[in-house]
Image (cartoon, coloured by chain):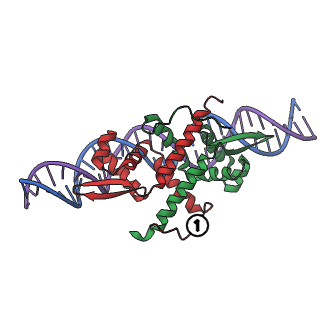
Chain colours: A red, B green, C blue, D purple
DNA sequence: TCAACGTATGAATATCTATTCATATGTAAG
DNA sequence: CTTACATATGAATAGATATTCATACGTTGA
């Protein structure tokens, strides 16, 4: 069971906009977005992400640090490995909406 | 009446991810996000955006060019002015979902 | 045609950021 | 405790990008 936010998020507020922009910027890198998508499927270790996306573990770790700090992902230790997964499901919605946008854009591609 | 996308958008596809990342990156700048939010409320001219956000018309125009190219916004000429507005409603959904994410994150702020 | 206004564009720059490499930290097994 | 493995961190760097300034383009009215 999830508690409701106590205060409404004000879209006009300066720091709310900055906060949103920070999150979008995080998703605005193809490598990082691929990492997010990979973690959305199932919890997965740093090494496995690196292997699946053919990236260096170091690079993956750098990105994971940012994503964890922004509360997009969370890490859970299991023995020597750390498994990363989505902190909540909103990110999935955000991406799905954006996919819909891309889909529509593609659809009217021939217009001009 | 809107036609349906003829082809499914494949999330695994390399260029789909890049396309998505490009869009997120566009929204990942606070100034640009403020411009988007302003245009989401109602069609508004370049000069009025600049005034409302206290930005130079030149800077606004630079950002609008990118947002138009990415099909986030559209521009429509009315006399000397050009009014910008959202091309479709998906961007609004994307932002709303992200606001929800921020709301949840704020809600558990005290956890660690 | 000219002037005035609104918008767009190009170059220059200072800042930011993704990536790499080397190294450190933490964990489990022997 | 040491070795091996998994992940994290810090510095260095090459490339990207937001902003500014100057200038050009397009539109309207005189």
Where residue A70 appears, as percent x and y from the top left, is 43, 58
Q: Is residue D2 above or below residue D24?
A: below
Residue at screen point 43% across, 35% down: B14
Residue nearer the viewer, B54 or A100: A100
Residue D9 place in picture, x, y as percent: 31, 57
B4 left or right of B20 in image: right
User: Given the image, what chain letter belongs to the residue carrying mark 1?
Assistant: A
Q: Which of the 4 image quadrants contains residue B76?
A: top right
Label 1: few (<14), some or many (≥20) within 10 Å?
Answer: few
Report which residue position mark 1 lands on. Answer: A8
Foreground of the two, C19 or B43: B43
Residue C24 coordinates in the image, percent (x, y): 23, 57
User: Which residue is depicted at the point 52% across and 42% down?
Assistant: A99
Q: Nearer the viewer, residue D22 or B75?
A: B75
Quarter of the rendering occupied by the C terminus of chain A: top right
Quarter of the rendering occupied by the N terminus of chain A: bottom left
Answer left or right for A68 relative to B47: left
In the picture, measured across the screen, residue D30 lies left or right of residue B61, that is right
Q: How many marks?
A: 1
Q: Residue B21's spot in the image, x, y percent?
A: 48, 43
Task: Look at the numbered disc 1 and give the secondary structure of its residue.
Answer: loop
Which image quadrant for residue A50?
top left
């Amino acid at each position: 069971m999830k508690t409701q936010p106590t205060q409404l998020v004000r879209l006009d507020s300066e720091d709310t906009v900055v906060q949103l922009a920070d999150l979008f910027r995080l998703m605005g890198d193809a490598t990082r977005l691929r990492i997010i998508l990979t973690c959305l499927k199932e919890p997965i270790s740093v090494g496995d992400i690196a292997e699946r996306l053919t990236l260096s573990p170091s690079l993956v770790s750098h990105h994971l640090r940012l994503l964890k700090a922004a509360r997009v992902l969370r890490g859970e230790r299991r023995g020597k490995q750390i498994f990363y997964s989505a902190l909540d499901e909103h990110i999935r919605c955000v991406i799905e909406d954006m996919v819909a946008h891309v889909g529509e854009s593609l659809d009217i591609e021939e217009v001009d």
